Amino acid sequence: MNRRRFSVRMLAGSILAGFAYGCIGEIFYRKLERGMPQILLVTLYVTGLFLFLGLSVFLIGRFGYYQVYGAVNRRQWVVSFLLVAALSAGFEFLYGEISFLGRRQAFSSYLFVIDHSGSMNETDPDGLRYEAIRKLLEHKDPDFCYGVYHFSDTAGMVRGMAPVSEKSPETEIINEGGTAVLHALDTILEDLDSGKLKLDQRCRMILLSDGYATDVDEAGRYDCIRRLEQFAERGISISTVGMAGEADTQLLTLIADKTGGTYVSVGDVSQLEQGMRQAAQAEEEKRSLLGYRSAGERDWLYGVLRVVLIAGLGMLVAVEKTVLCERFLNTNSVLVSSAVGSVLAGVCLEVGMNLLGAEPSAARVAGCVLMGVTVLYEDAGEV
């Protein structure tokens, strides 16, 4: 009878193909994610993965196996390609539009968290960030509330939540020390827990910074995620404004994405007023299958939905690889391994980004590797 032999060549080649696409695709994804509609970006990313993995499996089989039974079923391949393109767009639209929480209402108050680190002596030596705040508030109703925190190496409240009509205390602007963003978030949470600070569920925090956080490294990203989830669970969204080219874009984007806020980048202080207005706008929550998602009530439903949708797209990749491998024997192992990899890819994206705080880039590359996994058994001759 025939013996079956596990194909190391196919497994290693498919994993390398997934890793290669993850790295290449990430270059384009990060360049386009801010300027291209998410529905188009996700569709291009997933269809690109479909084509790349399919071609890789085909070439490994074509040059690695001498037993070939007929041509590839082109009709089945075309149908699976059209389905993956249509469902990529459809699933991204569904994930971005479906709401278990209702629509956001206009904000009833602002809490400004302002960087006073030493680098601000160069970025905003004249304190124009406070002029931008004043202009943002000048047309608000007299009973509209706002508060202000400063942070550098330490953080503290300089104006409690009070109506616009109540005059703010005069404070001297002193820029010195580092940029302890995580400490600032901890201070605000402590003040909320103690009752020193009271925010309603329609408060928009606006955090402004011009440099890299001095108290958050890669190991501390998980801790940062946990803090952000506490804000999101309280219904408090945080928009972030990055000033100049040295701002910690990665961290500021994480803060905004995880709490349902907006990240705004301003090139210099002359653009600050416009940036602050953009950060203060009430927007519908934005979600993407391939990016961070803000936490909140019923968050687990969005997590389950992401896993299901990603697994569904991965199943189409599994079908494609099966169609291509029909020429190279034993397609059952190809289908099963690819299906399992697709489910694991969905779990990896969800758990990696939204529970462990992994970089979206790393989670997407890992997802591509898992979707690429292809187990093939080939005949090894008679025994």
Image (cartoon, helix red, strand yellow):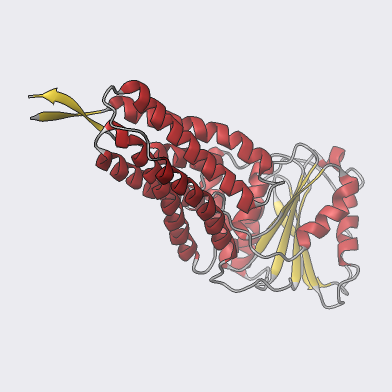
Horizontal placement of 212 versus 102: left or right?
Answer: right
- Residue positioned 34% across, 41% down in the render: 322
Horizontal placement of 293 versus 348: left or right?
Answer: right
- Residue positioned 42% across, 54% down in the render: 312
The image quadrant that residue 283 belongs to is: bottom right
Residue 18 seen: no
Above or below — where is 39 with respect to 370?
below
Residue 342 seen: yes
Horizontal placement of 250 versus 100: left or right?
Answer: right
The image quadrant that residue 45 belongs to is: top right
Place of residue 371 in the rendered image (x, y in percent of width and height, measured from the top left):
41, 41
Place of residue 20 in the rendered image (x, y in percent of width and height, measured from the top left):
49, 29
- Residue positioned 53% across, 71% down in the render: 100
Above or below — where is 349 with respect to 165?
above
Above or below — where is 14 with respect to 343?
above
Place of residue 359 in the rendered image (x, y in percent of width and height, measured from the top left):
54, 42
Residue closer to the observer: 104 or 163: 104
Number of numbered markers: 0
Residue closer to the observer: 224 or 178: 224
Residue closer to the observer: 139 or 325: 325
The quadrant in which the N terminus is found is: top left
Residue closer to the observer: 376 or 103: 376
Place of residue 272 in the rendered image (x, y in percent of width and height, measured from the top left):
86, 50
The quadrant in which the C terminus is found is: top left
